[in-house]
C-alpha cells in the first residue's frame, strides 16, 4: 500500500469529511490559518496536525504538501533562509498553468498564501521579501533552498509518523541554496515602516515570535 493509502487508513469518518473539503490550495491555506500556532520546537506529521490542530511553519508546510498531493500536485516544500537575526520559514509549493504559488503557516500575515501567478521560484520568493522581517523591523530574507520533493521520504512514512521529519530537515540543510541579496544590498536595506510592521503582526501569538539579540 502506498503512503497516501496508509494515511487514509488512519482517518476517521469525520476526518475524511474534513479532508474532502480541502480540494483547493486556498482551502488548505484557510485550514492552516485556523490552527493554533505551535510554540514548540518538536515536529508534527500531517496526521498529527489534522488531529491536534496545532502547527508551526514546518508542520504547516508538510501538512500543506500532503494535502496538495491528495489533489494531484507533487509534495514540494522549500525553506526560506534569513540572516542570523531571524528564523527560517517553510512553504509548500504548487504550480498551475506553469506558474508557481505557495501555502504557508506563519505568525506573520504576509508569509502565507501566494496565488500561482509567479513565473519562477525566485519570483515567488521575492514576493515575500518586504514581509520577511524580525521584531527589530529588519528585512531579513537572504536566500532559499531549491524545492524539495517529499516523495523519496514515503518509505519512512512522513505523512503518518513524526520520526521521518528530522530526516527531511536534515535533507533541507544539505539542499543547494539560492542567494537573493549581495552583501552590499543587505547593508543598504532600510527598516520596515512602523505601519507595515504592525499590520504584519495582526493576530500573531507573541510567545511564538523569534526574538533577535539586541545589537551591541
Image (spheres, grey):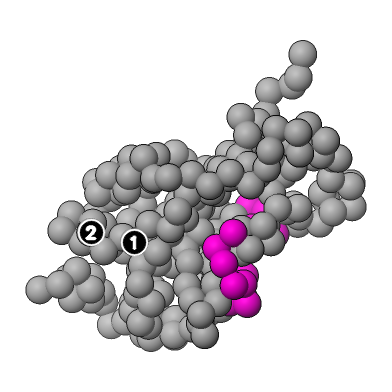
Image quadrant in which the N terminus is located: bottom left
| Residues at discs 1 and 2 in contact (Cβ within 8 Å) | yes
Classify residue 15 as left or right of residue 84.
left
Q: Residue at x 37, y 83 (%)?
A: 71
Residue 2 visible in the current orientation: yes
Residue 149's mark? Answer: 1
Viewer-nearest residue: 205 or 97: 97
Viewer-nearest residue: 148 or 180: 180
Up the image or down, 119 lies above or below 185; here it is below
Measured as percent of width and height from the top left, residue 168 is found at 32, 48
**Which of the 4 quarters of the picture holds residue 216?**
top right
Range of residues picked out in magenta: 107-122
Mark 1, other Cα within 10 Å: few <14 / some 14–19 / many ≥20: some
Residue 34 included in the magenta stretch of the image: no
Q: Which residue is mark 2?
A: 152
Measured as percent of width and height from the top left, residue 148 is found at 38, 57
Classify residue 95 as left or right of residue 76.
right
Measured as percent of width and height from the top left, residue 213 is found at 68, 23
Q: Residue at x 74, y 21 (%)?
A: 214
Residue 9 visible in the current orientation: no
Residue lying at the far top in this picture: please name it. Answer: 216
Q: Residue at x 35, y 82 (%)?
A: 72
- Circle 1: element type: strand
Up the image or down, 4 lies above or below 54; here it is below
- Circle 2: element type: helix
Q: Residue at x 81, y 56 (%)?
A: 199
Number of on-image labels = 2
**Which of the 4 quarters of the picture holds residue 158?**
bottom left
Residue lying at the far left in this picture: please name it. Answer: 1
Amino acid at each position: 500500500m502506498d503512503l497516501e493509502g496508509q494515511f487514509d487508513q488512519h482517518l476517521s469518518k469525520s476526518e475524511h469529511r474534513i479532508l474532502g473539503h480541502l480540494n483547493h490550495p486556498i482551502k488548505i491555506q484557510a485550514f492552516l490559518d485556523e490552527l493554533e500556532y505551535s510554540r514548540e520546537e518538536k515536529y508534527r506529521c500531517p496526521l498529527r496536525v489534522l488531529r491536534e490542530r496545532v502547527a508551526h511553519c514546518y508542520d504547516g508546510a508538510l501538512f500543506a504538501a500532503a494535502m496538495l498531493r491528495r489533489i494531484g500536485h507533487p509534495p514540494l516544500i522549500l525553506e526560506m533562509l534569513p540572516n542570523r537575526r531571524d528564523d527560517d520559514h517553510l512553504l509548500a509549493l504548487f504550480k498551475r498553468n506553469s506558474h508557481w504559488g505557495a501555502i504557508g503557516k506563519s505568525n506573520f500575515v504576509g508569509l502565507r498564501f501566494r496565488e500561482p501567478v509567479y513565473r519562477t521560484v525566485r519570483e515567488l520568493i521575492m514576493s515575500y521579501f518586504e514581509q520577511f522581517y524580525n521584531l527589530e523591523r529588519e528585512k531579513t530574507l537572504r536566500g532559499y533552498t531549491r524545492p524539495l520533493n517529499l516523495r523519496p521520504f514515503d518509505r519512512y512514512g512522513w505523512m503518518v509518523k513524526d520520526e521521518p521529519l528530522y530526516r527531511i530537515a536534515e535533507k533541507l540543510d544539505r539542499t543547494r541554496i539560492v542567494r537573493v541579496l549581495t552583501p552590499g544590498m543587505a547593508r543598504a536595506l532600510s527598516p520596515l515602516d512602523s505601519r507595515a510592521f504592525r499590520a504584519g503582526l495582526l493576530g500573531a501569538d507573541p510567545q511564538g515570535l523569534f526574538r533577535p539579540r539586541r545589537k551591541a
